[in-house]
Image (tube, rainbow, N blue to C red):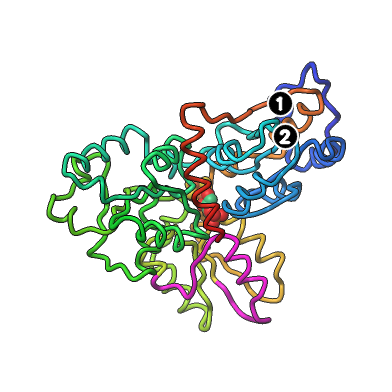
Amino acid sequence: MPAPAVSAACATLDNYLLYPDHALAGRIAEARERLGRAAVILGHHYQRDEVVRFADFRGDSLQLSRQAAASQADHIVFCGVHFMAESADLLRRPHQKVLLPDLQAGCSMADMASLDQVEQAWEELERLQLADEVLPVAYVNSTAAIKAFCGRHGGLTCTSANARQVLSWAWARKPKILFLPDQHLGRNTAHDLGVALDEMLVWNPRQAYGGNSWERLRQTRIWLWQGHCSVHARFQPRHVEQVRADYPGVKVLVHPECPFEVVQRADLSGSTEFIIRQITQAPAGSIWAVGTEVHLVHRLARENPHCTVLHLDAAGCPWCSTMFRITPAHLCWTLEQLLAGQAVNVITVPEANRAAARLALDRMLQLAV
Ligand code: 13P
Ligand code: SF4
């Protein structure tokens, strides 16, 4: 039975959370229609089906930041996580507002690099007279404060879709890169570009000089911040070996946030959009084991019956608990509050970081990749 409409007076989020997911579908559709062009709903590929089905645009992080920049709507409802909504806020037009249906939808990877830690690392590099040789690059899965740090020091952001181009751009300008905050994307991409593993170092923010000697720091071409995605870091080489033993001829396709040893054993790796493209264009009857967030993998399996899509770690089923925080109840509440004239959960990057963070994003977007 569909949930009855809630009057604006008792429309706290708690009222919505009482209903099961499916009960709010009709109300979300109605609110979406009544809002018309005043609102646009963006949905990342890792969002659950009951939410992403209402997205006007689905995409990977790069596509969604472009979409946010191109949108004319007054309100951008971002079904994703906090750093994505921050990027949308940096790229929006002056009259627009960005809303994140649940403010708790963060990203554990983004939280692994705080501004204090990164500034301390930079001070240490200055003390060693190395900072002038370094360009900082932040994966977009980082806070606006970290993006601003990169912007201030001549650096830029990247996504999993354009990391190769961004690192090449950075090395054309400086001999060394400080890559934040995902060590795996940094290592996989640098290796792809021909950098040897012994020219890369992990920077441990809890140790002086990242836990490295001066000699090693000097020889390094890329310092990999010791951060990771809690979803993708769980994939292991044994998962690849097992699926190859169980399904001879299987193609293994993984996200570059997976550990190096997993990416090396896979047939292909790339962003969520790349993964989707491989599966939709796959030959009929082919078998694929996909190493990424489970909601996307299950959707790919359902929407592509021409091939077989398996999860690389079927027993573990890694899912992103923060992406999962955006429920139909949160989306319905956000849209109905907009209809009642109230913008809830507005994400605003503080003025002190806006210009520099935007600069880091613009440098990436201007690379046109
Ligand atoms: P992409 O969609 O850019 O591949 O990012 C994956 C991810 O982990 C988003 O949080
Ligand atoms: Fe962060 Fe990983 Fe979740 Fe993406 S999948 S939002 S990187 S924790």
Which span is picked out in magenta? 264-288
Is residue 352 found left or right of 215 in the rendered image? Answer: right
Above or below, 123 against 344 in this view is below
Above or below, 254 against 227 in this view is below
Instruction: Give residue 261's position: percent from left, percent from top.
Output: 35, 67
Which residue carries the number 1 mark? Answer: 343
277 in magenta: yes
Q: Confirm or deny contact between disc 2 and disc 1 (CB under 8 A).
A: yes
Say if residue 319 shows up in the picture. no
- Beta carbon at label 2 within 8 Å of ligand 1: no
SS under mark 2: strand
Which residue carries the number 2 mark? Answer: 75
Q: CA distance from mark 2 to mark 1?
A: 8 Å
Q: Which residue reaches farthest front? A: 173
Identified at 36% across, 61% down, the residue is: 172
The quarter holding residue 341 reads top right
Residue 9 is tagged as none
SS under mark 1: loop
The quarter holding residue 17 reads top right
In which quadrant is the C terminus drawn? bottom right
252 in magenta: no
Identified at 23% across, 58% down, the residue is: 220
Q: Nearer the viewer, residue 253 or 310?
A: 253
